[in-house]
Structure formats: structure tokens, C-alpha cells
Amino acid sequence: MTSTNRRTFLALGAAGVTATAVAGCSDDEQPTPSPTPATSQDATPTVTPGGLKEAVLADKPLLYLDFQDDADAKNPADQSGNKRKAVLHGKMWWPNDALSLAAPNAVGRAFYSGVSNDEAWIEIPDARTWLAEAPKTGLTVEMWLCQDEPNFNQTLFKLHSTSDETGWSIGLRQEGNGLAAEGPGYKAVELDSAKLPKAWHHVAMSIDAKGAVTGYVDGKQIGTGSIGLFVGKVKSATVGTKDGKGASLSGQWSHYAIYGSPLSADRIKAHHDAGVQKVDPAIRGVDWWFGGPAYYKQFTNAEVLADEKRFHVAEWWMNAFDEDLPTEKKYADGAVVVDPQVTPEGLRKAGIWTIRTTGMDMTGKPGAETVGWLPEDEADMATEKMAKMEENLKKHPRGYLAYSNFGTGVTISSIDRYRVRPLVDRPNLHQVSADLYSYCFSPKVCQQVEDAWGVPKEIARRAAIHGMTVERCRAFLTRPRPVWGLVALGHGGVTAPGEPGWSSVPSADEVEGAMMSCILGGASGILLFPQTFPDSKKAPVWNAKTAYKAGDTVRDPKETHRFWYARVEPKQGVDPNTVTDDTWLSWRPGVFGVRDKDHFARGVSDRVEQVKARLQTHAPVFNARSVHKTFNDKLYTRYWPTTPDGNSYLLAMQKIEHYSGEYQLQLPEGVDAKQVEVVDADRTLEVKDGVFTDSFAHEWEHRLYRWKA
């Protein structure tokens, strides 16, 4: 590293412990207020309530910010008993110039977000008095942090000097993201630390009076070095720096403490251990739990969603007439956005609940059928949509559920990530989802997935991508809430059938795999999106019942109707009421038209009905709290150790990079099952030495296993 880069480390301060919109801490990596808090992915420790605070206070910190109170949002409270001051400064771009901060939960966590050319930092204004002796006595700084995508040098603590020299600084290097320190003359020490995984970590560094530094990650010493004597007197202290000049401080923080001497390795390990939930090393952690179906009891008219015996499958944009709704009920028991042809009375009579939206929804006053409202769809994809969502949330009916679906801002970060995270994570959104159409759009989307996720475009079009999308959406949240999975059933219409870039539509097998993948990702419900948009408002001539009814791909694959799109205009001389399956229409003038056989794979409606029925059968399992456990590192797995029926369940599917193979699955320690039942398959597998073997022939295959708990 050149001296210029070293100077940048101190001058730019911090781009933060970056919890970005692209890949924030997952459900397994978030702290939880549960009595059995989550551990991070692959058993990386996370902050836990109780025990840790006592361990910190036992070593008499000079400053201790635990971020447990909502009031910490702007002025984090010192819990050391010394009544020190800490002031948070920062800006964000949306929805105004206020600081992007999600108030911490009961465990103690703060999320800071700054943006390029703005600043976000914590000022410790009176540090020049109570840290005046630190150059003579040494000090220790420790914290729990969760970072994502560290693209900048990141300052975790800086002790500013009155001299022209730099003082002492502790941070994470951009190159490899190792823990590092710098002293006078930009003398830098890069400790032997690999890039920290995207999870909660305990990080600490001690500096003695001679400038000798020792670094620790997750309770283990990772290296030593020297940054030299402190030059001058203490001027101030900051977390990050106020002269950001293109960098900013962001991330999720908890239990930040400064001590007036170098702590011993044993004491630092004790602090780490006090914050770790001891679990089977193979268990990645209890999911970040929003409370299950009971969560919905707090909302007006949402009792139907609070039923623990139902796992909900809903349809996005239900195109139907009232007389079709009883049939529609076979495929979806709810609807998010319905066509204006549908009436509230028709939904109530059919027993279908709905989440309504303004401007693109049915008419009629809401009644018992309405369980919530959608303020805006894909607000992360355009600035005007962000503004519209903000406007609609201000008018949101009091007491009702607020739900929004997001798009490429979440899934492939097509707009600035610092604007997206607070949009998705806003506290007045109670349920979220995200769409990604690599399964049914052109290869262009698969290329975007490769660029954003690192998943090769050749395998991006697989069922497993749906569960990964659910996890990606959850990564934007700093408070537990339900995340639903979205499965598109038809082709989205980016290119014409047979033209370069045309992607085949998902088969019935693939749709089933996608639905189960959502559950593997932790989805609390599933949305089916037929991708057909009849638009009676823009083209009234299309209201003819024979044409309009064809709009629903969930119901119509058994029939020979055409599929109509929004903004559809007939070719010159074509009567829309006499259209046949061989008649081409233009979706956009001069682009293409789609016939049902090209738009939608037949057999999907029957399969959706079958999967929905199985989901209801196993709803008490899928609605229960689950954990991640590594049964085989080539499989995605979701594990329910105990369920209401007294059994343990395991859902498994191959990871996206695998297509077929035979796998050995290791049961948890202490499980003495002799056989494992493959649910809904009428077969059992023998267990030998705690291991059973099964094979998968296709990427979309999944297995639900059961044994006596």
C-alpha cells in the first residue's frame, strides 16, 4: 500500500461497516430478542442480550454504547456510568436529508448509513479530557459489528492529535478487509486477518503506551505490531471521521466500548464468549423470528393470516370475473392487487382475502376481504416511485397491514443502494417481498444476476434462485418481519418467442421447485405471478368477456384462450372479439405478441393446486420456527427440530451450483432415529451411524424428511 493509500485510510475515515442493500446480514446473522438468540451463518457468533453487558462493565469502560434504546438514534447513551457524550452525525439521500438510522431493537443494535460525498460519523466531544491520558496508559476499543460489501477503508476508532501528525487510528483495510491500525507518519500495521464474512463479529484492538497493537476477531488474537508513540496531545475522538471526502460510515453496530488500558486476551475472550449463544457447531442459528402467523393479529381484518393451520398462497394481480373466483380459490386463497372487474363482494363470497392498492385495483369500499394495502410496487426502481410510496404511506389506513414488493433495487441493485435500504426497512412497512425473473425472462436478467450475485448466468435460471431472493430481501431488514416469496408462472415478455434471447417458460416441475425453494429461504407465504395484464381502463374494447377472461394464466392453461397484456393494441383490422389462437397482436407497437402456448407451460395449474394442498397439510410445520443446519454442504436445508405433531422435519434441495447427485445427510448429534421418512413419497431411508443417503436427479427436486423428535 502506498503512502497515499495510507493517508486515505485516515483522512477518509470510514466508509463504514457496510450493511448495504446488496447483501446485508441475513436472517441467520441478525440478533434476535428471543430467549434463544440467533447465531450467524456457519456458527459465527452474534450479539446476545444479558451476560455481555455485565462482562463489559466488569472491566470499567471509559465509554460504553450498547444501542439498546430508541433514543440512541441521534445521541447514543453511555452505559458506563461515566456520563460521556456521543453524538451521531450523518446524511442520506432518501426520503430527505435526515440520517438513515433504523432504531435498535431490544438486543441492542444500530444501523448507520451514509452516502458518497456525505458524512456519517460519531463524535465523542469531550474525549480530550477523559482520554487525555490514553497515550500514556494505552487503550482498548471493542465492538460487535456486521458489515457487508466493504468497498472502502473503514475507520472503527480514531484518536485525533493536536499535532500535525495523525494520532492513532483503528480500522479495516479496503485491500482484503483485514483489521489494521495506523499511527504518526501514517505508519500502518495490517494484521493477519482474512476478510470478515458478512455476519456479526466481535472485533477488538488494544494499543499500549509504546504504540504496540494487538488485534482480536471473535475472541481470538489475530496479530500484533507497532504504530509508534502518540505525538502531541489528544484533541478529540471519533468513530469514522468528519472529513469523509467521499467516504462515509455505515453498518450495524452493538456494544461499542473504550477502555483506558490494554485488556488482556483472556478478558477480550470473556467478552466475546458472553455474547455468543452456544449451539451445535453445525447449526447456523435460529431464524430471525418475526413471530409466525400470530404476528398478523395486530392488524385490522388480518385474522385470516394469523391462522397457524394455513400456509398462504396468494396471486399477484388476479385477473378474473366474480364468477371465476371459486375456481381461483383452488390455486390461491388470497390476492395482492386484483383487477377492477373483481368486486369486494365477490371476494368475500369466494373466501379470498386481498391486499389492495390505490390506482390499479378494484373499486368498491373495503370490507372483511381487505387485510392490508400496498402503497407502491417496486418503489426501489425509480425515484418517482419512491416519492409515490412515501405519499401513499402517509394516507395508509390506520391499523391495516402495509406490504410492498420490491424489484431490481433489491435483487440486482440497479439504483443507489443507500437509497434502497431505508426504503425497504422503514418501520411502517409490515411485510415485504422481492421479484427476480431469471426463471422466465431473457438471458439479460441472468447476466445481471451474475454481475450482482456472482452466480454464473448459465445456472441463474434454476429453482434455487427463488429462496436466495427471499434471503436477499430479508438482508435489507434490521427488524424482524415476514418476507414472502414470489414465483412467476409465465413469460414476462422481454423478447418474442423464437427470437434471440427468448427464455423458455418454467415447467410445472420448475414452478413446484420454485415454490418450495421460497420456503427454504424462509418465506412466510408465496405469491404466484401469472404475468398477464388485461387493462380494461386503457382499452375498454377488450372488456368483451370472451377475451378478458383469458387473462389469468393460473386458471386458463387448460383452455385455449389468448393471454392479453396491459397496453395491448390490436393490429390494424383485427377485431379483438374474434381473435383466435393464431392471431398475433402487438404488446408494444412493432415489438411482439404472445400466444398462450408460448407464454405459459401447460400443467402448471394442476401442479400449483397440488402444491398448495400439500402446503396446507404441512402448514403447522412450515409456520413453526426453524433453524438452519448443515446436513450436507452441497444442499440448502431448513430444519424444524420440534413441531406440533411431535416430529422433526427437514426440507432439502440442491444448492444452485448442483444439478444432480447422491448426498449423505448427517443427523444432528443426539438424534437416534433408525429410519427417515420421505414425506409424500411413500418411502423410508435407513440411518446408519447418524447418516442417511438420498439422491436428486434434477435441480428443482426437493425432499421433505421426517423422523420422531
Image (spheres, rainbow, N blue to C red):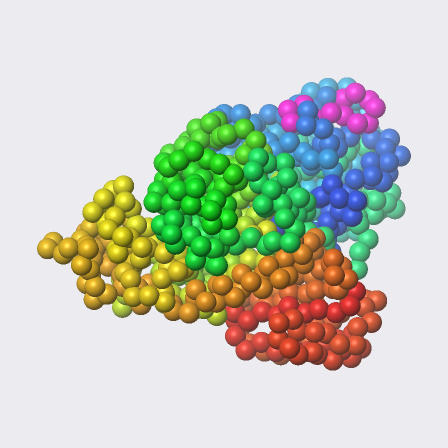
Residue 177 visible (yes or no):
no
Split into 4 quadrants, where in the image is the C terminus?
bottom right
Residue 107 visible (yes or no):
yes
- Horizontal side, residue 64 vs residue 291: left or right: right
- Between residue 453 and residue 61, name the one nearer to us: 453
Q: Is 67 located above or below residue 610 in the figure?
A: above
- Horizontal side, residue 92 vs residue 201: left or right: left
Q: Residue at x 69, y 61 (%)?
A: 639
Q: Residue at x 50, y 48 (%)?
A: 351
Q: Position of residue 614 (x, y in %)?
A: 58, 64
Q: Position of residue 283 (x, y in %)?
A: 74, 59
Count up the numbered dots.
Answer: 0
Q: Residue at x 86, y 45 (%)?
A: 270
Q: Residue at x 84, y 67 (%)?
A: 670
76 drawn magenta = yes
577 drawn magenta = no
Q: Position of residue 364 (x, y in %)?
A: 39, 35
- Between residue 587 and residue 336, name the one nearer to us: 336
Q: Position of residue 32 (x, y in %)?
A: 71, 43
* Rendered image quadrant of residue 253: top right
Q: Is 493 located above or below residue 499 in the figure?
A: above
Magenta span: helix, strand or loop, mainly? loop
- Horizontal side, residue 476 vs residue 358: left or right: right
- Between residue 660 and residue 531, name the one nearer to us: 531
What residue span does the magenta drawing correspond to? 73-84
